[in-house]
Image (tube, helix red, strand yellow):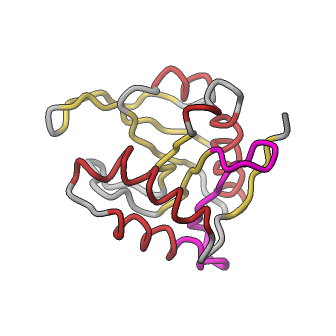
Amino acid sequence: MTIEIARLKPNSLELQTCAAWRYEAFLKSYGYSLADSAAQLAKLATQLDEYETALIASVDGHLAGICLLVLQEFEPLHDVSPWLASLYVAPEYRKRGVARKLVAAIEDQAREHGVARLHLYTGDAEKFYVKCGWSLAEQGIADGEPYAFMIRNL
């Protein structure tokens, strides 16, 4: 099994799939539309000289996941920047190291741009991120859902 990480390209078939994944997993419950998700990813895909980016993972040539490096979360509870956001791996590729590779690639991208600390929110993947070297900074409830605010010193 070969896992490859690459930048999401504008106007690609992968962009539409990733937009749908992101919409269903993260944005739908906040009132965003699928079109909003696609527009946000298209913007990230065209920012080649900026450090904000969307990275995708492919397993043996098949799209498997996405992760973002962004300056701002879409509904931040903390006034910090930048963020690892929207980590999503398709169910058939989970537990194969895809998420770890995406997280490591986002961390590398941030380091290359002089970022000293990354931030993220998770609802249910705290243990995964701890295994990846992240630290829990805060736990709480937002909009009736539990969250963990985590940091990674680079």
Q: Nearer the viewer, residue 114 or 40?
A: 40
Q: Residue at x 54, y 71 (%)?
A: 44
Q: Residue at x 50, y 29 (%)?
A: 135
Q: Position of residue 30 (x, y in %)?
A: 22, 52
Name above or below for residue 146 compared with residue 149: above
Q: Is residue 36 magenta?
A: no
Q: Position of residue 58 (x, y in %)?
A: 73, 48
Q: Position of residue 57 (x, y in %)?
A: 69, 49
Among all residues in the image, which is located at the extreme left?
A: 144
Number of labels in the image equals 0
Q: Residue at x 50, y 20 (%)?
A: 127
Q: Nearer the viewer, residue 147 or 31?
A: 31
Give the quarter of the figure containing the C terminus: top right
Q: Residue at x 56, y 67 (%)?
A: 52
Among all residues in the image, which is located at the extreme right?
A: 2
Name above or below for residue 134 compared with residue 118: above
Q: Nearer the viewer, residue 11 or 126?
A: 11
Q: In the rendered image, which quarter is residue 55 located in? A: bottom right
Residue 133 relative to residue 43: left or right: right
Give the quarter of the figure containing the N terminus: top right
The part of the chain drawn in magenta is: 44-64
Residue 139 relative to residue 115: left or right: left
Q: Is residue 54 magenta?
A: yes
Residue 20 relative to residue 102: left or right: left
Name above or below for residue 15 compared with residue 139: below
